[in-house]
Image (spheres, grey):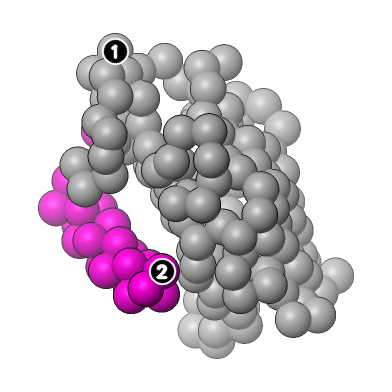
Amino acid sequence: MKRVLAIIMFGLLIGAMVLVTAAPALGYTPGVWTGKGTLENGTSFALRLHDVVGQGQNTLRVNSGGDRFQLTQLSKVEVLNDPTITPQLPAVNDTYHGWGVGKYNGVGGYKAEWIFTDASGEIGDLDYFWIKITDAAGTSLKLEVADFLNTGEGDTRAG
């Protein structure tokens, strides 16, 4: 059932991103997104990402099936309050869409795009993570994973 929800949620999420310009929630203060855990497919991740490029040190590490990615530069960020994620809380963004460059299996120059949702309050079982890693030209897919968190949690806070 969760896999069906994942596909529906991901489709709605991508659709919302296409239809909604990256508008933070009214009154939103830029913040930091943090999280770590394991997805249901076994992929592990750890992140500490700012809402604003250049605001501070950013970390994103992903391990999946023996492949590793480590962010070295955050390039672009869009945060928004996705209307398909409930409950809707005032001044809280629940979706982080990021782009950056990093090391894939120890080699630099790989592009990454990811979406992380903080959809469940204190329990991370409805939080969702998707990442796609390509070569420097963006033409050769190296890794793509998407799933709900199995363990761990993600969170966003002002700061």
Q: Position of residue 25 (x, y in %)?
A: 27, 25
Task: Please name whichever residue, 87 or 81, is drawn nearer the observer in this view of the structure.
Answer: 87
Task: Please name whichever residue, 137 or 20, is drawn nearer the observer in this view of the structure.
Answer: 20
Residue with the mark numbered 2:
2
Q: Is residue 33 magenta?
A: no
Identify the residue at the far front of this view: 1
Q: Position of residue 97 (x, y in %)?
A: 42, 49
| Above or below: residue 90 compared with residue 22 | above
Residue with the mark numbered 1:
27
- Residue sitting at x 43%, y 41%: 120
Tell me if I can see residue 100 in this picture: yes
- Residue sitting at x 23%, y 61%: 12
Looking at the rendered structure, the secondary structure element under dot 2 is helix
Q: Position of residue 154 (x, y in %)?
A: 57, 41
**Mark nearer the N terminus (1 vs 2):** 2
Which residues are the magenta region?
A: 1-23
The total number of labels drawn is 2
- Residue sitting at x 29%, y 13%: 27
Q: Give residue 3's quadrant in the image.
A: bottom left
Crowd around label 2: few <14 · some 14–19 · many ≥20 (10 Å): few
Looking at the rendered structure, the secondary structure element under dot 1 is loop
| Above or below: residue 30 compared with residue 79 | above
Crowd around label 1: few <14 · some 14–19 · many ≥20 (10 Å): few
- Residue sitting at x 54%, y 46%: 124
Q: Is residue 4 magenta?
A: yes
